Amino acid sequence: MTRVNRMIRIPKVMVVDDDGEQLGVLDTQEALRIAEDKGLDLVEVAPTARPPVCKIMDYGKFKYEQSKKARKARQASHTVKVKTIQFRPKTDDHDYQFKKKHIITFLEAGHKVKVVMRFRGREITHMDLALDFLNNLNEELEEFGTPESRPQREGRQISFIVAPKKV
């Protein structure tokens, strides 16, 4: 929380003018009077410094510019979503092709894809077939994405993540 004007309770502060010129260490009341004479606010910019640094500025304009910078930073940062596609050991050929097509569209859109092979009941005994299935899928996806990890077993499922290829 930025302290402004009368919220600043420390007796002496280092004051920077609205032009960026240092006025030196002044009494807080005197610094407030100077700011009010100019029609501006006294804003604490470095509260941890000794004495704290306060700047004479238009606080409303300052807050607006800070929010603009934050908005621009949010727009610049691109979050990569991880999409999950689940298979079963008995996944039929048509379902396999359908899900593979979805994985390719996700990779082309720039998303990472977590491929999960889930087992139920006694299906877990055929782990070697599932690994062959996932390796085959991995080879078919090579031109669209690169695997970030090898298939790993996590309880009753095996999963790996495919990242999109860089363009």
Image (tube, helix red, strand yellow):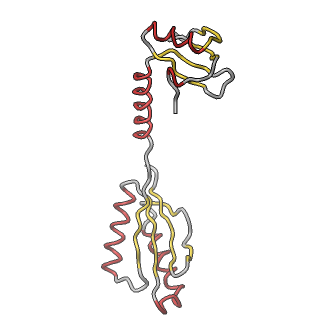
Residue 158 appears at what percent x and percent y? Answer: 51, 76
Looking at the image, residue 145 sits to the left or right of residue 149; the answer is left
Along the viewing direction, whichever of 130 and 136 lies nearer the viewer: 130
Looking at the image, residue 80 sits to the left or right of residue 46; the answer is left
Along the viewing direction, whichever of 65 and 137 lies nearer the viewer: 65
Q: Residue furthest right?
A: 50
Q: Residue at x 44, y 57 (%)?
A: 164
Residue 112 appears at what percent x and percent y? Answer: 44, 59
Residue 89: name its quadrant: bottom left
Q: Residue furthest bottom?
A: 122
Residue 62 drawn above or below residue 89: above
Q: Residue at x 59, y 15 (%)?
A: 28
Residue 99 drawn above or below residue 55: below
Looking at the image, residue 18 sits to the left or right of residue 12; the answer is left
Q: Residue at x 45, y 87 (%)?
A: 120
Residue 100 appears at what percent x and percent y? Answer: 36, 70
Residue 14 appears at what percent x and percent y? Answer: 63, 15
Residue 88: name its quadrant: bottom left
Q: Residue at x 47, y 59 (%)?
A: 163
Residue 6 drawn above or below residue 22: below
Looking at the image, residue 73 sits to the left or right of residue 44; the answer is left
Number of on-image labels: 0
